[in-house]
Image: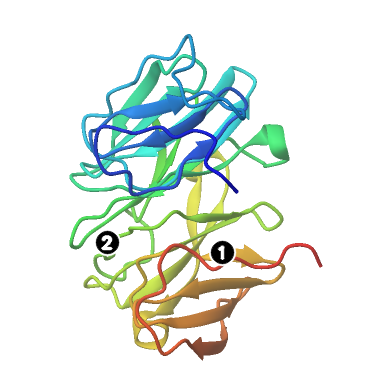
């Protein structure tokens, strides 16, 4: 169809826009969050919007979460900060630094949608020794991180570049990584109360599934992830047992596999 309107940001936008109830939001390499009015004649700034400055580019799409306190969009920036923005006026609600490098969009579990807890879940993206965090979505304070003292020791986790996937039914979260000094690249953590919100569920060695820059996706009793060599893997969500792989004979699988959720 014909183009009805367009909006030009101040720099390259590497993530797709997010369509919210109040506006269309897009992060840009000019380090701002832009907004455009919805509708067939849209494209202009919403009347109340003020572009929040993130301080560094956010290059992954971040969903808008309709919480009781108002709609929130959560961004992970390349310099290791996580930031919460009010999706109506663009006001920054909080910001928390979790490392020296990051950029993955935060995933979340919320009691408002049937989850057992309210956590934002996101990892860091340094060359080695990374952590995976649970943050309070209301304040940005750190609830827990993995690995910490007493957790199973594998060595340093490689860079976590993709958004995690939350399994509401099992109370688990899955994330993928590059190789660090730890030999694993696909991880499952069990979610629990704030006293110990993140505990190890299972891991899959990188020697099996390879380094993964993208995001795993859970569908039914399987977790799907595409690696940097272009191979799609299916893994059992309960045990972490690799079930099968499909080589695409192409380059790295980017983003995330998209399962048919209709049937």
Q: Nearer the viewer, residue 147 or 2?
A: 2
When asked about the image quadrant of residue 61, the answer is top left
Colour mode? rainbow
| Viewer-side residue, 70 vs 239 | 70
Q: Give the percent coordinates (x, y) of residue 64.
A: 54, 34
Q: Residue at x 24, y 38 (%)?
A: 11
Q: Position of residue 218 (x, y in %)?
A: 61, 64
Q: Residue furthest front?
A: 2
In the image, residue 113 sits, relative to residue 210, either above or below, namely above
Nearer to the camera, 172 or 221: 221
Name which residue lies at 49% across and 64% down. 256
Q: Residues within 10 Å of mark 2 (few under 14, many from 20)?
A: many
Looking at the rendered structure, the secondary structure element under dot 2 is loop
Determine if residue 139 is in view. Answer: no
The Cα–Cα distance between marks 1 and 2, rounded to whole angstroms, is: 18 Å
- Which residue appears farthest toward the right when viewing the image? 263
| Residue 152 visible somewhere in the drawing | yes
Q: List the residue tagged with mark 1.
A: 217
Task: Give the image location of residue 182, x and y in percent.
Answer: 28, 73
Q: Residue furthest top?
A: 48
From the viewer's perspective, tell me whether residue 20 is left or right of residue 195: right
Q: Are marks 1 and 2 in contact (CB under 8 Å)?
A: no
| Quarter occupied by the C terminus | bottom right
| Badge nearest the viewer, 1 or 2 | 1
Locate residue 18, reporting x and y percent. Answer: 51, 38
Name the mark on residue 159.
2
């Amino acid at each position: 169809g014909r183009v009805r309107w367009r909006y030009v940001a101040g720099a390259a936008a590497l993530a797709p826009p997010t369509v919210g109830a109040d506006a269309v939001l897009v992060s840009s390499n000019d380090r701002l969050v832009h907004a455009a009015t919805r509708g067939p004649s849209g494209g202009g700034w919403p009347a109340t919007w003020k572009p929040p400055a993130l301080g560094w580019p956010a290059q992954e799409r971040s969903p808008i979460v309709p919480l009781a306190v108002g709609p929130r969009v959560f961004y992970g920036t390349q310099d290791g900060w996580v930031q919460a923005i009010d999706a109506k006026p663009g006001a920054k609600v909080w910001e928390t630094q979790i490392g020296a490098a990051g950029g993955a969009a935060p995933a979340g579990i919320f009691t408002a949608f049937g989850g057992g807890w309210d956590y934002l879940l996101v990892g860091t993206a340094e060359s080695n020794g990374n952590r995976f965090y649970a943050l309070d979505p209301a304040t940005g304070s750190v609830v827990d991180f993995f690995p910490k003292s007493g957790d199973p020791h594998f060595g340093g986790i490689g860079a976590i570049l993709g958004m995690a996937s939350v399994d509401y039914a099992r109370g688990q979260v899955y994330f993928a990584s590059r190789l660090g000094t730890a030999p694993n690249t696909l991880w499952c953590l069990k979610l629990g109360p704030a006293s110990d919100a993140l505990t190890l569920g299972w891991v899959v060695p990188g020697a099996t599934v390879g380094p993964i820059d993208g995001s795993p996706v859970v569908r039914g009793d399987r977790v799907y992830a595409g690696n940097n060599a272009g191979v799609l893997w299916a893994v059992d969500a309960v045990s972490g047992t690799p079930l099968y792989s499909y080589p695409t004979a192409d380059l790295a699988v980017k983003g995330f596999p998209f399962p048919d959720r209709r049937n």
